[in-house]
Amino acid sequence: MTTITTLLVANRGEIACRIFRTCRDLGITTVAVYSDADADALHVREADLAVRLPGSAPADTYLRGDLVVAAALAAGADAVHPGYGFLSENAAFAAAVQDAGLTWVGPPVKAIELMASKTRAKELMSGAGVPLLAPVDPATAGADDLPLLLKAASGGGGRGMRIVRELGALPSELLAAAAEAASAFGDGEVFAEPYVERGRHVEVQVMADAYDTVWALGTRDCSLQRRHQKVIEEAPAPGLEDALRTRLHDAAVAAARAVGYRGAGTVEFLVSAEGRPYFLEMNTRLQVEHPVTEAVFGVDLVALQLRVAEGEPLPAPAPPSASGHAVEARLYAEDPARDWQPQTGALLTLEVPDGPGLRLDTGYVGGDTIGVHYDPMLAKVIAHAPIRTEAVRLLAGALERARIHGPVTNRGLLVRSLRHPDFVAARLDTGFYDRHLADLTTPGPGDPATAALAATLAEAVRATTHGTGPAPTPTPTRFGAWRNVPSQPQVKRYRSEPDGTEHEIAYRTPRTGTPEPYDAPGVRVLAATPDRVTLELDGLTRRFSLTRDRDRLYVDTAGASYTFTALPRFTDPATQTDPGSLLAPMPGTVVRLAEGLAAGAAVEAGQPLIWLEAMKMEHRILAPTSGTLTALHAAPGDQVEVGALLAVVQEDLDATPVPASVPEETA
């Protein structure tokens, strides 16, 4: 038996904050580690003590087990919790923690080693009677074996994963998957298995102690994924027959017993459309989606992890009874309509409604900055209710009413996903976004023009009360001259973000001083201040709240949120870029160039020219058209800001243009 008094969390962001919360409840002193990029991060501010890991890149900081162990010793910690990701499933790190005389809040080193390789784990599970997909030898694969799924033996998160539907593509895809796996995990081993079309990702949470007690804490469905990474999870997995549920529970317990497991872990399965389960892998750590299990079973999994690490038994031979349904949505700073492109910048506002059945786990608050070095997940929003329909409705409503200002997020996609007929009917499988993404990212039936009107009125009031309006006489040499006559119509222009639609709003300010729309029948201004506007639209009263950050305006109203960029009355020619300019889609690091790339080189439409890495994603910057590279401003190792000019391609007028940036891989 041991007693943990001071715990270092070898992680950052949301999971570090979540573990600290339980530690505060238990009276445990908390220690954070942080990179230079995270010096002002929320997890650092919430910890009792913090230790700097010099550098910003994960390889120099959070992945340096020696530095983390040294930090724990320097802070006087007596235990280490790895969270998820980074070193959480690294057996050598777990061993180093224990060798330093510290308590490891995780499974035995041997269990981590046995499950570290998916190929070896499958062999072990076969002996334990856990259902498996039959492996396929790529060297002898035939047309009848298609489609195939290639997977990295080590690591996860979609790296080294390829779907092969044509036999002729198998050799090249094997090479690509092996190269990607070697780069991501230091292990190029790849294996092949049948690809299950329209399969469901269903997992079982297990919790085990050192006294031969193993709990199976129900099922979770994690089928809604993009690039093999989860987006929406729920517990219990809906629509499973009792016999299948029992089989999954029994298989998960057998898997845990086969490796002598202790602590929290997750056994993941693929369930075919016919209801047949197949073992995928065992995650020897706490999962991102653990809150839905906590909500349904009324437990604190982190508290149970600490209890088991201290040598205590689980509080009962069987888990508590489940109650109700829980759904979790991962809120990402990313643009789903642009190939899930990660977003960076200042997070001005992050406010999610609080109330019965709602929970927010986050590593950010308003005023924080989203950087380029780490995963773009901002928060997890969880809803729990007696039945699934109510939990889904509660979560969708909370996300819809949230105020999130700053970089583009997937909030709209989450709301539409939760309300999609297939999700509502629990018709779930891993191809959900492959089929529905276009519809889910198409602008809905909102009213951006009225939101732009509200922004215009608020800005007009702001200009009057704070003296921030345009100068009455701009420089005549460029634009000519005019006078702003308050009683006459004036115009403001906005661009909707991120779709680029432009709105031109005419208004006037009568002698009463309250601005009003010009030539807008059916619209009446009931109240207008710089941060709130109330309009009556054909008898319906609507309220709009406004937040401004430089030239950005954020408008929140019931059921919708809008972001606008204020545009000048006239376009400044100096802001234009040359045709064929390739601009950095986000801040990041240039990792490589196409072989032989130099000014004067001929390029083909769609040819990868520059590889840019940011936020655990690698982007290929493609030639937008066939032509000649007339300028190259990028070199490997360059740190570039969003919008930086990387290269210029002079177009062959007979060529067909293509998108200039494509995300290639995620971690």
Image (cartoon, helix red, strand yellow):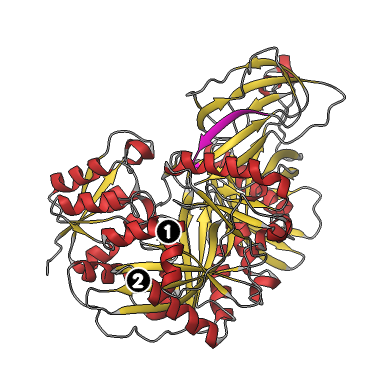
Camera-nearest residue between 223 and 25: 223
In screen coordinates, is 549 left or right of 266?
right
Residue 630 on the magenta segment: no
154 versus 176 height, above or below = below
Q: Amino acid at mark 2?
A: Ala
Q: Residue at x 30, y 53 (%)?
A: 91
In screen coordinates, is 619 left or right of 345?
right
Residue 467: % across, % down = 55, 35
Residue at mark 1 to residue at mark 2: CA–CA distance = 13 Å
Quadrant assignment, res 599: top right
Q: How many C-alpha atoms fall within 10 Å of the one at disc 1: few (<14), some, or many (≥20)? A: some
Q: How many C-alpha atoms fall within 10 Å of the one at disc 2: few (<14), some, or many (≥20)? A: some
The answer to whether marks 1 and 2 mark residues whose Cβ atoms lie closer than 8 Å is no
Q: Tag count in the figure?
A: 2
Magenta segment main secondary structure: strand
Q: Which secondary structure, mark 1?
A: helix
Q: Residue at x 32, y 55 (%)?
A: 16
In screen coordinates, is 223 left or right of 80?
right
In screen coordinates, is 86 left or right of 498?
left
- The answer to whether residue 510 of the structure is visible from this angle is no
Q: Amino acid at mark 1?
A: Arg
* Residue wearing tag 2: 258
* Magenta segment: 608-616
Residue 308: % across, % down = 23, 70
* Residue wearing tag 1: 120
Residue 277: % across, % down = 55, 74
- The answer to whether residue 569 of the structure is visible from this angle is yes
